[in-house]
Image: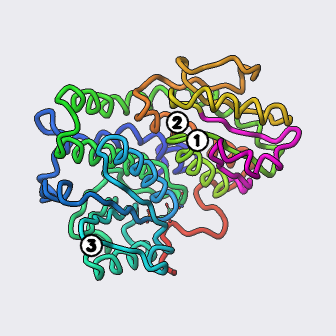
Amino acid sequence: GKGGYPFYMEKEIHEQPDAIKDTVSPHIVNGKTSFAEEGIPDSLFRENQNIVVIACGTAMHAGLIGQQLFHTLANIHTDVAIASEFTYTNPVIKPGTLVIAVSQSGETIDTLEAIKFAKKKGAKVLSIVNVKGSTIADNSDYCIYTHAGPEIAVASTKAFTSQASVFYLLAIHAARLNGLLSTEEVAHYLDELNRIPEIITQILDKKSFIQKMTNKFLSHDQAFMIGRGLDYSLLLEGSLKLKEISYIHSEAYASGELKHGTIALITNGIPVVALVTQSALASKEYSNIREVQSRGASVLLITRQSLYKDMNIPEEDTFILPEMDDLFMTFPAAVVMQLIAYYTSSAKGYDVDKPRNLAKVVTVE
Ligand code: M6R
């Protein structure tokens, strides 16, 4: 059942603290990352200094988070490919390339075809999958399971944050194996991972505030979302969520790209979600917010206290996230984005769990 919630999506959003705990904890052994249970040899992250993530939709967005983690922590070059494009664009797979496939269902045909293609080219495939014994798990050399439990709502939520948590573990693991992190740094990152369930609970406690914030979208048929770095990846996911279940056309834009075209679409009253969680990028991001404000955009600001800047945005349009290490702001931000989409869809009276034209598992190319 729906556990007392009107929709599975809301139930699944609330299951994230447990989903992440259950996914992460088996891989922290004696204060160190471990994938011994999966039979993943240390050499996999020593010998492969190129990673290609292949996935679709939300799983692909988890891959974008993974890309930044592998870059930042492990100094491993990482590309993210849309599975359906990968197979048909003659990708170059040289020795030393590890393919990481990500899939909640483990049955997505585009991802499966991409795996088969990569294996033919000689790559080793590690998959991150939620459904035990699924076809993608069976077709991979190694498989790490997320323990999100069954995800019923078409819009993926707990699978996304669980997949992301595996990327944190893997990037810390790879960095550690390549001698890039001190014992203290490993301990710090693992502490942050362990804090995620509690941090998500803090967001869930403020969900009625997010519900009020979303009123902003109700009278519009389009929205923009702007951010930089990790925030941009999260907005791609938040934007997909909003499109998928509320049928509002939403475009996530890397803030620095705005002036290269999209800002032409910003006119009076257009809702713009601005996500500011990365310290090093905050001042640039605030200039971009000013740019859209001066074109009349109505801005919803999601930031953290340490980066908050008074931008003349009404209090009811500002959400302050709890503080974590910059790299880990993914989790509180993701949950806010999920709730924005959820409340918009339910306020419009849609069947949140079963959006039109979509299936939970895509088995046709
Ligand atoms: O089962 P998979 O993770 O392979 O599915 C991939 C996408 O079809 C899926 O994430 C889709 O984008 C969701 N509906 C997004 O909410």
What element does badge 2 sit on? helix
The residue positioned 37% from the left and 32% from the top of the image is 196
Q: Quadrant of residue 311?
A: top right
Amino acid marked by disc 2: Ala
Q: Is residue 212 left or right of residue 70?
A: right
Nearest the camera: 71 or 357? 71
How many other residues sit within 10 Å of disc 3, few (<14), some (14-19) or many (≥20)? many
Q: Earlier in the sequence, mark 1 or mark 3?
A: 3
* Image: magenta residue range: 246-275
What element does badge 3 sit on? loop
List the single residue furthest toward the right. 268
Amino acid marked by disc 1: Met
C-alpha separation, residue under disc 1 versus residue under disc 3: 35 Å
Pointer 1 and pointer 2: residues touching (CB < 8 Å)? yes
What element does badge 1 sit on? helix
Location of residue 329 in the rendering, given as x and y in whole percent from the top left corner: 46, 33
Nearest the camera: 78 or 315? 78
Location of residue 187 in the rendering, given as x and y in whole percent from the top left corner: 22, 28
Q: Which residue is mark 1?
A: 337
Q: Earlier in the sequence, mark 2 or mark 3?
A: 3
Q: Which residue is mark 3?
A: 123
